[in-house]
Image: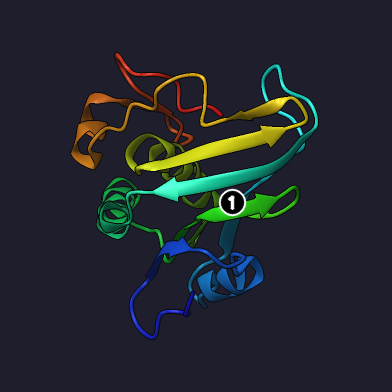
Amino acid sequence: MQIPSSGDDWVGLSNEPLPVAEALEWAHRPDCGAVVLFSGVARDHSSDRSNVDQLEYEAYEAQVDPRLAELAVEARRRWPPVGRLVMMHRVGELVIGDSAVVVVASSPHRPEAFAAARFCIDALKATIPIWKRERWDEGESWGLEAQHIIEVGDLNNATVAADGSVTLRDAPSTEH
C-alpha cells in the first residue's frame, strides 16, 4: 500500500504484508503528541481450536474503501482533535504472526488517540465486509456464526463508550 501523498487518512486493503512501521511513522505529526497503534496479529488458536496454522481473509472489495473512508469521517466527528488515521486490512492467506489489521490514530493528547483507535477497530469489525477462514490440524472453517455487517451510519444506534469501544444493539459482539 502506498503512503498517501495528501490528506490525513490512510485506508484500504492489501494482499501484501501490511506496512505497520510505515503506518506508525506516517501518523506522526508535529502537533500530535499521542500516537496509538493497534495491530491484529494472526495467532495459533481461537475459540475451541488449537494448532491454527493459517488464516485467509476475503472481502467485498468494492465496499471496503468507501466504508473505511466513511468510518474515518465518523471517528473525526466524534474526536475532532484526531490528526491522522490509518485503517488497513489484509486479504488473502496469512500465517501465524502476520498482521491482519492495523489501526493507528494520532492526536495532540492520548485520550482522543486511544478512544479513536479503539472505536476504529471495533467499528471496522462491525461495518466492513471482511470474512476469515481458519485452518487448523483438524479442519478449516469460515466461522461458526454469521457476521452481521451494519452500515457506518447505524453506529449512531450503537453505544460508544468514552474509550471508543462499540457495543451494538441487536447484533453479535464485535469482540473476536
Quadrant (top left/top right/bottom left/bottom right) for the C terminus: top right
- Between 165 and 171, the residue placed more toward the observer is 171
Q: Is residue 176 above or below residue 55?
A: above
- Between 116 and 57, the residue placed more toward the observer is 57
- Looking at the image, which residue is at 41% across and 79% down? 4
- Between 145 and 123, the residue placed more toward the observer is 145
- Looking at the image, which residue is at 43% across and 61% down? 13
Q: So how many labels did they put on this image?
A: 1
Q: Is residue 37 visible?
A: no
Q: Is residue 94 above or below residue 139?
A: below
Q: Position of residue 148 (x, y in %)?
A: 33, 26
Colour setting: rainbow
Q: Position of residue 14 (x, y in %)?
A: 49, 64
- Looking at the image, which residue is at 33% across and 18% down? 171
Quadrant assignment, res 45: top right
Left or right: residue 139 versus residue 33 is right
- Between 66 and 95, the residue placed more toward the observer is 95
Q: Residue furthest front?
A: 139
Within 10 Å of disc 1 (Cα), the crowding (few <14, some 14-19, many 20+) is many
Q: Is residue 83 visible?
A: yes
Q: Residue furthest top?
A: 170
Residue wearing tag 1: 100
Instruction: Check disc 1 and give the amino acid type.
Output: Ala
Q: Is residue 26 above or below residue 63?
A: below
Q: Position of residue 158 (x, y in %)?
A: 29, 25
Label 1: element kind:
strand
Q: Is residue 57 above or below residue 148?
A: below
Q: Position of residue 135 (x, y in %)?
A: 67, 36
